[in-house]
C-alpha cells in the first residue's frame, strides 16, 4: 500500500496486488455529498416531468388549436367582467355583487356554444324563478308573525328542495335542465335563509340577478362571436368520421383474415388504428348524447337550420354501433386458435372480399353524403352491388356441403388410395361465423342507409346530382328472410 498525488493534486491511496499491478482506492462519498446528489436527482426528475408535461400540452395545442382558442376566450370573458371591479362607475352600479358576475363566467363558459347557452339559460331562469318564489314565500311568512315565520320558511325550503332534487331523476329533466335544478335549489335556499335576517331582500335579489345576467350575456356574446365552436358541427363531424372508421375496420378485418393484407402489415401503427377504428364508434354514445343535447340549444348556423333534427343523429349513431358490434365479433375471428382448412378459405375468399369491398363502398358513400349534406345518386347502385354480393356468398355457402364431401386436392394427388376425410366441425365453424357476420353486417348497413335517408329528408339535404351510373340497378333488392333461412340451412348442413 502506498500514497501519491493524483492529477488534480489530491492525495490518493494505492494497493499493490500480485502481478506487479496497483489499484487506486476511491474514497467513499461523504454524507453531505450524498444528500446533494439526492437533491440534484429530485430536481432533475421534477424538471423532466415538467418538460414532458409541456411537450404534451404543446402537442394538444398543435393537434387541436380550437382548445387553445377556447382558453383565450375564457380569459377574455374574465378580463371583461373584471372591469366591474376595476372601473369606479361600473362598481358603483353593482357594488360588491360584481363577484357573482365573475363566478358566473367561471361556471357557465363551456367549450361549445350549445353548452354555454344551455348553462346560461338554465342559470338565469333558475335564479329568477327561485328568487321570485323566495321573495313571495318570505312575504307570506312575514305576514304570519314572528312565531310562524321560521316554520314556514323551513318547511318551504324542505318541500321545494325535495321536489327539485326528485326532478333531477327524471330523464328528460336531467338531460337538459339538471344544472338549472341545482341552481334553483341553491338560490332558493340562499334567498329563504338570508331573507330571515336581511331587510332589503328585493334589492339583494335584484342585484344578484342583474350581475348573473351580465355574466351570462358576456359568455354568450364572446362564445358566439369569437371563433364559435358549435356542438352541432362537432356532432355532425363525429358521425362522418365514424362512418369512415367503420369502412376501414371492415375492410381491414376481412383482408387480414384471408391474409390479403400485404399493405396492412407495412402500414404499421396507422393501419392498426384503422383496423381498431370500430372501438371509437362503440365508445361514442356518451359524446353523441351530450352533443345532441347541447346542439338543441343552438340557433341556426351554417348548414343547420333552426329545429334541425338532432335526435335523428342519435338513431343513426345507435345503428352504427350495432354494425360496430358485428365488426368487433368479426375481429374476434382473427384471434381464434382454430383455423379453417385452406381449400375452404379459397372457395369463399373471393366472394367474401367482394362483399367486404361493396359494404365498404356503401359506408364511404354515406360518409360523403354526410360530409357534403347532399343526397347521393350512387347509393342505390352501391346497395344493389352489396345485395348481389350477399346472394353470391349465400350461393357459395350452399355449395359448401358438396365441397366437404370431396377430398382436398392435395390428398387426391398424394395418396389416391386414401379415404375421404371430413374436416372437424371446429375447423369449419370460424369460417361459417365469418360468413354469417358479413351477411349480418350488410343487413345492418342497410339500416344505416335508411336512417341517413330519413335524416336527409328531415334536414332537407341538397338534391343529388344527375350523374347516376349506367349499370343495371335491378339488383337493388333487400336481403329477405328466406335468403337468410337458406344460408342458415347451408351452415347447418356444413
Image: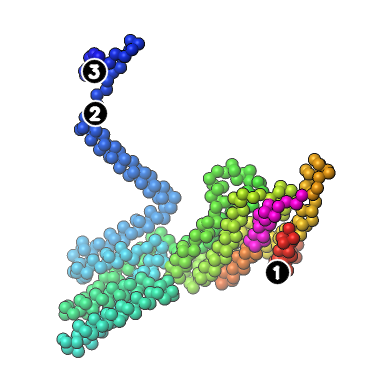
Query: In the image, what residue occupies the spot 30% across and 75% down?
Result: 185
Q: Quadrant of residue 9?
A: top left
3D distance between C-alphas at marks 1 and 2 = 84 Å
User: In the rendered view, would you say 163 is above or below 252?
Assistant: below
Q: Which residue is mark 1?
A: 481
Characterize the local packing of mark 1: few (<14), some (14-19) or many (20 or more) Cα atoms within 10 angstroms. Answer: few
Mark on residue 12?
A: 3
Earlier residue among tags 3 and 1: 3
User: Can you see residue 487?
Assistant: no
* Marking on residue 29: 2
Rendered residue at 57%/57% (across/down): 328
The majority secondary structure of the magenta stretch comes to: helix
Determine contact: label 1, label 2, CB under 8 Å. no
Q: Which residues are magenta?
A: 421-442
Inspect the magenta stretch and tell me whether residue 61 lies in it.
Answer: no
Distance of label 3 from label 2 (alpha carbons): 14 Å
Amino acid at each position: 500500500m502506498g500514497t501519491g498525488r493524483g492529477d488534480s493534486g489530491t492525495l490518493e491511496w494505492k494497493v499493490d496486488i500480485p502481478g506487479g499491478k496497483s489499484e487506486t482506492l476511491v474514497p467513499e462519498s461523504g454524507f453531505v455529498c450524498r444528500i446533494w446528489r439526492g437533491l440534484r436527482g429530485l430536481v432533475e426528475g421534477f424538471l423532466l416531468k415538467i418538460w414532458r408535461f409541456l411537450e404534451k400540452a404543446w402537442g394538444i395545442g398543435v393537434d387541436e388549436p380550437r382548445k387553445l382558442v377556447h382558453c383565450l376566450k375564457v380569459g377574455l370573458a374574465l378580463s371583461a367582467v373584471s372591469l366591474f371591479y376595476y372601473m369606479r362607475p361600473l362598481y358603483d352600479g353593482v357594488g360588491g355583487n360584481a363577484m357573482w358576475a365573475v363566478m358566473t363566467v367561471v361556471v357557465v363558459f363551456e367549450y361549445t356554444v350549445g353548452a354555454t347557452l344551455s348553462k346560461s339559460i338554465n342559470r338565469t331562469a333558475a335564479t329568477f324563478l327561485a328568487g321570485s318564489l323566495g321573495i313571495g314565500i318570505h312575504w307570506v311568512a312575514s305576514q304570519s308573525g314572528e312565531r310562524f315565520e321560521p316554520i314556514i320558511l323551513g318547511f318551504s325550503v324542505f318541500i321545494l328542495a325535495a321536489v327539485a332534487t326528485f326532478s333531477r331523476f327524471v330523464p328528460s329533466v336531467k338531460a337538459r335542465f339538471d344544472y338549472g335544478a341545482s341552481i334553483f335549489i341553491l338560490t332558493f335556499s340562499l334567498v329563504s335563509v338570508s331573507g330571515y335576517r336581511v331587510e332589503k331582500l328585493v334589492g339583494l335579489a335584484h342585484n344578484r340577478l342583474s350581475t348573473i345576467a351580465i355574466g351570462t350575456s358576456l359568455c354568450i356574446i364572446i362564445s358566439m362571436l369569437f371563433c364559435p365552436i358549435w356542438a352541432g358541427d362537432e356532432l355532425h363531424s363525429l358521425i362522418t368520421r365514424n362512418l369512415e372508421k367503420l369502412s376501414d375496420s371492415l375492410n381491414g378485418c376481412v383482408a387480414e383474415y384471408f391474409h390479403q393484407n400485404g399493405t396492412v402489415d407495412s402500414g404499421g401503427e396507422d393501419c392498426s388504428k384503422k383496423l381498431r377504428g370500430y372501438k371509437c364508434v362503440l365508445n361514442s354514445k356518451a359524446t353523441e348524447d351530450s352533443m345532441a343535447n347541447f346542439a338543441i340549444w343552438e340557433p341556426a348556423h351554417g348548414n343547420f337550420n333552426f329545429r334541425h333534427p338532432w335526435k335523428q343523429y342519435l338513431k343513426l349513431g345507435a345503428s352504427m354501433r350495432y354494425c360496430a358490434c358485428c365488426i368487433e365479433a368479426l375481429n374476434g375471428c382473427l384471434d381464434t386458435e382454430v383455423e379453417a382448412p385452406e381449400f375452404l378459405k379459397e372457395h369463399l375468399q373471393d366472394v367474401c372480399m367482394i362483399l367486404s369491398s361493396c359494404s365498404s363502398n356503401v359506408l364511404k358513400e354515406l360518409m360523403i353524403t354526410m360530409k357534403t349534406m347532399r343526397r347521393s345518386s350512387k347509393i342505390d347502385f352501391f346497395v344493389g352491388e352489396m345485395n348481389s354480393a350477399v346472394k353470391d356468398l349465400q350461393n357459395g355457402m350452399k355449395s359448401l356441403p358438396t365441397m366437404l364431401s370431396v377430398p382436398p386436392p392435395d390428398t387426391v394427388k398424394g395418396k389416391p388410395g386414401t379415404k375421404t376425410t371430413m374436416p372437424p366441425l371446429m375447423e369449419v365453424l370460424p369460417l361459417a361465423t365469418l360468413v354469417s357476420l358479413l351477411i349480418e353486417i350488410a343487413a345492418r348497413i342497410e339500416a344505416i342507409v335508411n336512417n341517413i335517408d330519413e335524416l336527409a329528408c328531415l334536414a332537407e339535404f341538397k338534391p343529388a346530382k344527375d350523374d347516376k351510373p349506367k349499370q343495371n340497378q335491378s339488383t337493388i333488392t333487400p336481403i329477405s328472410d328466406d335468403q337468410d333461412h337458406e344460408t342458415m340451412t347451408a351452415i347447418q348442413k356444413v
